[in-house]
Amino acid sequence: MNDFSGYITRHLTIIVGAYGSGKSEISVNLALSLAAERQTYLADLDIINPFYRSADTAAMLKTANVTLISSVYAGTNVDVPAVPAEVNRVFVDKETYAVLDIGGEDLGARIVGSLRPQIEQCSYDLLMAVNPFRPYTDTAGKIAEAAHSLSAACKLPLGGFIYNPNLLEASDSMLLDEGWPIMMDACLQTGLGIKFATVMSEYALEHYRFLPADLPILKMKRTIHYPSDFQEE
Amino acid sequence: MTKRVLMKGNEVIAEAAVRAGCRHYFGYPITPQTEIMHYMARRMPEVSGTILQAESEVAAINMVYGAAAAGARVMTTSSSPGISLKQEGFSYIAGAELPAVVVNIVRTGPGLGGILPAQGDYFQATKGGGHGDYRNIVLAPASIQELYELTVEAFNLADKYRNLVMILGDGTLGQMMEPVAFRDEESIETVAKDWAVSGRQGRKEHNEITSIYINPDIMEALNNKLQAKYREIEKNEVRVEVLQCEDAEIVITAFGIASRICRNVIRQARAEGIKVGMIRPITLWPFPSKTISAVASIESVSSFLTVELNAGQMVEDVRLAVNGSKPVEFYGRMGGNLPSQKEILEKIRTMAGK
């Protein structure tokens, strides 16, 4: 895990996005990459989906000294949307990093809107994860539309994008370049910038054709897994 | 190059249906398949289609009956407890010979059960949970790409035979993401629906869609007609994948997600010197009995192992097909747990005496 703390300047990093855009995987990897530098919280605030959430990685987070805050129902397969009261800790403990993993779509982002008064008391970055290989965000127009509805649900302006080009098992080192033109278009349409990009560790290269040399790249490993070992080996 | 997209199984089902010309979707949300409806709510307006959240599963399946009777391509989707509620409608659709597509993303049962994957609805899907002598075509995909292919195929088969076609997935397939490549255009096999209740269209008599026939001879004639159709489907529509059975000692039979797990086991067992093959039924009804029977007659084959996410359901059909010529063993997990490669390999070692 690379140390990413140099790139994260705010106390709160709030990650929203379209459904299945990689929010949880990014949140876990980001929290892991920050924990060595400072006390780090990861708050799983997904009120949309009981599956594949950051709380699934509780054991790994504990080992890495990341404090997980999640609903008592997370990981129990009790299909109940609930917000942990403990989330208020992150707004008080300001000398820490806190990554807030938000549920998908504007529906999931409503939780940010309801926490707005507390969030505004802190320094924060509200970021939208974008995977241009997902159907909801495969054009600049769709990304711009999603950015608008997410921001409206959060009742806060977006601070930028997290560029997360990903095809899971079919990913390769080409994806960062392949999705870049769509991403650039989305930036032009929205006036937002890209805060950082992600790449799965095994495909991390030193140089990409299109990416600016100074764009931070979070090297990720797969932390949230399928329930069984049915993947091709 | 076809554009690659990363999609959830549930999303692919919805997209495939729209591409196959489905313009009417009626459903009621239930985990782990609600994304189908979520996707439809976004997608249907783009193609001037209809999506409606019904007041219940029973209402949704009867809306399907109505739209199908009017000649529309129509779909409903649900998960196990919701599918139980729809069974009455399936029987009426069979009686009225209506083309419809139903998706069951199976979760654990019985009862309300849990939201995790299972294959415990095999009996219900293939033997008919509703009343009367009827059959639904049941398709069992094992990957996201295949979910796409088979969902499109389901609409063609439904129209061709005026029959209900069910996609039987499980919570894993519905929730997992894989890249999928869509065709630019679907090969939609349009069938003239001159039986539909869509106005008289110049005919003297109006069409009638019903399943009530009081006269026993007429009722029996309908049943005979249905049975003849089912024999025709059995003759034409069996789909099955046979993998490395030519020299196999042990033949695994598994469908859907269970077959995905077993695929890796074959490789591992062969590396240990145990020759394992697999028969993967893609249609659960019509069941590939002839294929299984033929493989059972291969001399090297000493036994079968059926792997399912249930207490042993498809294994009964495998035993009927093998017809006592070779022993058929079973391994399964329940409650939302999936069998691991290790567990299955262990079972195979025991069967091989190693």
Image (tube, coloured by chain):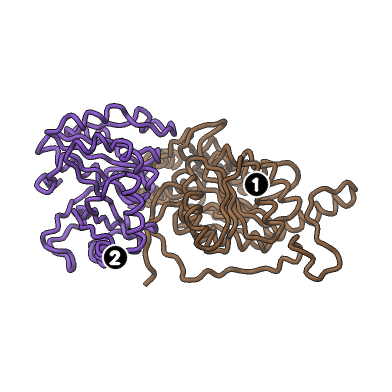
Numbered disc 1: secondary structure: helix
Q: Quadrant of residue B206?
A: bottom right
Chain letter of mark 2 equals A
Which residue is at the front of the view, A76 or B227?
A76
Nearer to us in this view, A73 or B159: A73
| Rendered location of residue B219, percent (x, y) | 85, 50
Please name which of the two marks, 1 or 2, marks the residue nearer to the observer.
2
Q: Color used for chain A?
A: purple
Q: Nearest the camera: B327 or A201?
A: A201
Q: CA distance from mark 1 to mark 2?
A: 41 Å
Please determine if labels 1 and 2 lie on a single subunit.
no
Q: Position of residue A151 (x, y in %)?
A: 31, 49
Location of the N terminus of chain B (image quadrant): bottom left
**Amino acid on which the number 2 mark rests in the picture:** Ile
What label sits on residue B61 in the rendered view?
1
Q: Is residue B204 visible?
A: yes
| Amino acid found under the numbered disc labelled 1 | Ile
Can residue B273 be seen from the camera position used here? no
Above-or-below relation of B155 to B319: below
Q: Which residue is mark 2?
A: A182
- Disc 1 residue crowd, few under 14, some 14–19, many 20+, Cα 10 Å: many
| Residue A77 spot, x, y in % from top left | 42, 33
- Which chain does brown denote in the image? B
As helix, strand or loop, the secondary structure at mark 2 comes to helix
